[in-house]
Image: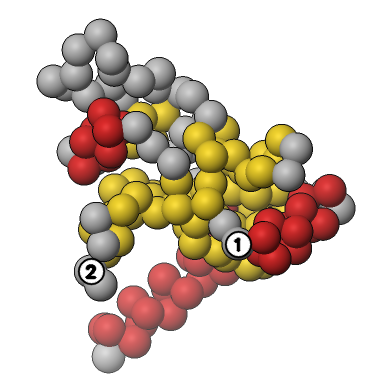
Amino acid sequence: MSEKLITENRKARFNYHIEETLEAGVVLKGSEVKSCREGKMNLSDAYGAFQGDELYLMNAHINEYSHGNRFNHEPRARRKLLLHRKELSKWFGAWTGGKTIVALKAYLKGGRVKVLLGLGKGKKIHDKRQDLKKKQADREISRELRSR
């Protein structure tokens, strides 16, 4: 199946050590799906949170559909994520253990909106600095190799 990228949260990998990823379906209204197909979704502050025994996508912003009428959706509503029971219980244990569930990217797969979730731990400032130094060193090495 072909995938069409809707949006990507590029800051997530900068702010978190992502240990594991998981694909989840999202329960959406019709106007939300149409807006996602137009690419009007933002995951910059989106995260996963458990309420009861269900996992929800919180703080994901989906713009109102341009041709929607009074039945349009709420842009920052919580949205239920569709996962198997085993996956839910595994991630619930990690989530209560102090890890964060971060939305990494959203895409269309087979006509349905999917979200790639990452289970991670927040980086400290010195970790971010080390990552930047490593990235710069890799760039310099690749420049030297290209110039030869």
Q: Position of residue 94 (x, y in %)?
A: 79, 57
The secondary element bearing badge 1 is classed as loop
In the rendered image, which quarter contains the C terminus?
bottom left
| Residue indicated by mark 2 | 2
Depth check: give the residue in front, 75 or 121: 75
* Precedes in sequence: disc 2 or disc 1: 2
Distance from label 2 to label 1 (Cα)? 23 Å
Q: Quadrant of residue 142?
A: bottom left
Q: Could you tell me which residue is drawn at 31 percent across and 53 percent down?
A: 112
Residue 44 can be seen in this image: yes
Q: Are marks 2 and 1 in contact (CB under 8 Å)?
A: no
Q: Amino acid at mark 2?
A: Ser
What label sits on residue 84 in the rendered view? 1
Q: Could you tell me which residue is drawn at 41 percent across and 29 percent down?
A: 61
Depth check: give the residue in front, 126 or 105: 105
What label sits on residue 105 in the rendered view? none
Q: Position of residue 96 (x, y in %)?
A: 84, 48
Image check: 83 left or right of 122?
left
Q: Is residue 93 above or below residue 42?
A: below
Q: Position of residue 18 (x, y in %)?
A: 63, 61
Label 2 neighbour load within 10 Å: few <14, some 14-19, many 20+: few
Image check: 72 left or right of 129?
left
Instruction: Return the residue found at the far left.
Output: 67
In the rendered image, which quarter contains the N terminus?
bottom left
